[in-house]
Amino acid sequence: MHFEIVGEIGHIETFAVGTAIRELERLRKVYGRGRWRKRKGVAKIKLTDGTLAEAELHWYEATGFGKKEFKIKRILKEY
């Protein structure tokens, strides 16, 4: 599902670091070595059909690479 993040991501938490990330080897092959973290947060998003919603998002992040591979985990509220 494609979407656009509208505004800031809030309530950010890190819930996996380094070898606790199942996709660590793939991340290193695709983007390079780094201190990878799996994070989650809440943001307002715009879906491809134009619907605005608040959703919990998950993504990978490392210093020098930024935020990569956003996923919608669940829709919290639709507008």
Image (spheres, rainbow, N blue to C red):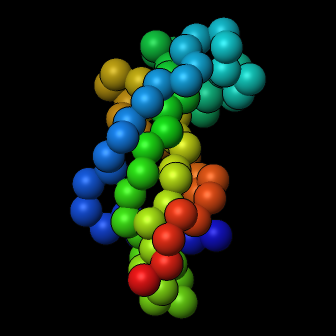
The residue sitting at 49% across, 33% down in the picture is 39
Q: Residue furthest right?
A: 22
* In the displayed structure image, the side of residue 26 where residue 4 appears, left or right: left
Residue 22 spot, x, y in % from top left: 74, 23
Residue 60 spot, x, y in % from top left: 52, 34
Q: Nearer the viewer, residue 25 or 39?
A: 39
Can residue 31 be seen in this snapshot?
no
Q: Looking at the image, how many numbered discs can be counted on the residues?
A: 0
* For residue 55, above or below residue 21: below
The residue sitting at 64% across, 70% down in the picture is 1
Q: Residue furthest bottom?
A: 49
Q: Nearer the viewer, residue 43 or 1?
A: 43
* For residue 59, above or below residue 3: above
The residue sitting at 42% across, 24% down in the picture is 62
* In the displayed structure image, the side of residue 56 where residue 1 appears, left or right: right
The residue sitting at 62% across, 59% down in the picture is 74
Can residue 34 be seen in this snapshot?
yes
Residue 20 spot, x, y in % from top left: 67, 14
Q: For the C terminus, which image quadrant?
A: bottom left
* In the displayed structure image, the side of residue 10 where residue 23 appears, left or right: right
Q: Residue furthest front?
A: 77
Q: Nearer the viewer, residue 50 or 53?
A: 53
Residue 49 spot, x, y in % from top left: 54, 90
* For residue 41, above or below residue 18: below
